[in-house]
Amino acid sequence: MCNIKGKPRAVSDEEWRARLTPLQFAVTRRAGTEPPFSGELPPPSSASARYGCVCCGAPLFRAADKFDSGSGWPSFHSAADGAAGRPDGSSVETRTDISHGMLREEALCRRCGAHLGHVFDDGPRPTGLRYCINAAALKLTPEE
């Protein structure tokens, strides 16, 4: 299901494959993970820039909330428009992920269901959260 421009509709794997690179498809539609330190995230032109979902364009993270976690993936301490860093009210939602023999919180695009990465409780102030996100799931969106 995808909600692009307010119109929910099912998007087939064939359509996603046509829209995305093979890596973007593997990450966002198959819950894959890019190798650490391999992602290329465009630098923002200002702290007010936002990173959006590569699949549907939903605004997900503010450039001002990005930090270097040393993990090898882009990290953010808050989801855009989320209360106290949690995704409530934002374009990011979470769900429990028990894959790979671990208990984690998966981060997903609320609009189209794209897998983004995971959320951990070892981030910096002000939230203490670390949204560990695949660069392949993000694109720099135009500033408002």
Image (cartoon, helix red, strand yellow):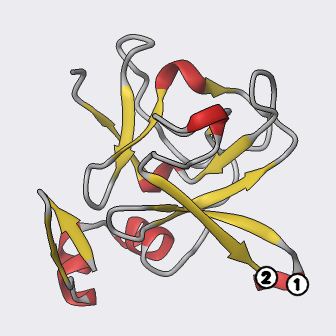
The residue that label 2 is drawn on is 98
The kind of secondary structure element at disc 1 is helix
* Disc 2 element: loop
Using residue 120 as the reference point, say whether residue 25 is left or right of it: left
Which quarter of the image is occupied by the N terminus?
Answer: bottom left
Q: Residue at x 47, y 28 (%)?
A: 62
Residue 4: mark in rendering? none
Q: Where is 4 relative to 69, above or below?
A: below
Rendered position, 103 above or below 138: below
Q: Is residue 133 left or right of residue 91?
A: right
Identified by mark 1, the residue type is Gly
| Residues packed near mark 2 inside 10 Å, few (<14), some (14 to 19) or many (20 plus) | few
Please name which of the two marks, 2 or 1, marks the residue nearer to the observer.
2
**Left or right: 108 in relation to 1:** right
Spatial CA distance of label 2 from label 1 is: 6 Å
At a point 72% along the width and 27% down the height, the residue shown is 68
Residue 141 lies, in percent from the top left, at 27, 34
Give residue 101's mark.
1
Which residue is pictured at 58% across the width and 24% down the height?
65
- Measured as percent of width and height from the top left, residue 21 is found at 31, 66
On the image, the x and y values in percent for residue 120 come to: 79, 51
Q: Is residue 76 visible?
A: no
Asked whether the viewer can see residue 101, the reply is yes
Q: Position of residue 122 (x, y in %)?
A: 87, 41
Compare residues 3 and 117 and report the one nearer the observer: 3
Mark 2 residue type: Ile
Specify the farthest residue to the top. Answer: 46
Q: Quadrant of residue 48?
A: top left
Labels 2 and 1 touching (C-beta < 8 A): yes
Left/right placement of residue 78 relative to residue 115 reads right
Measuring 41% from the left and 71% from the top, which residue is drawn there?
113
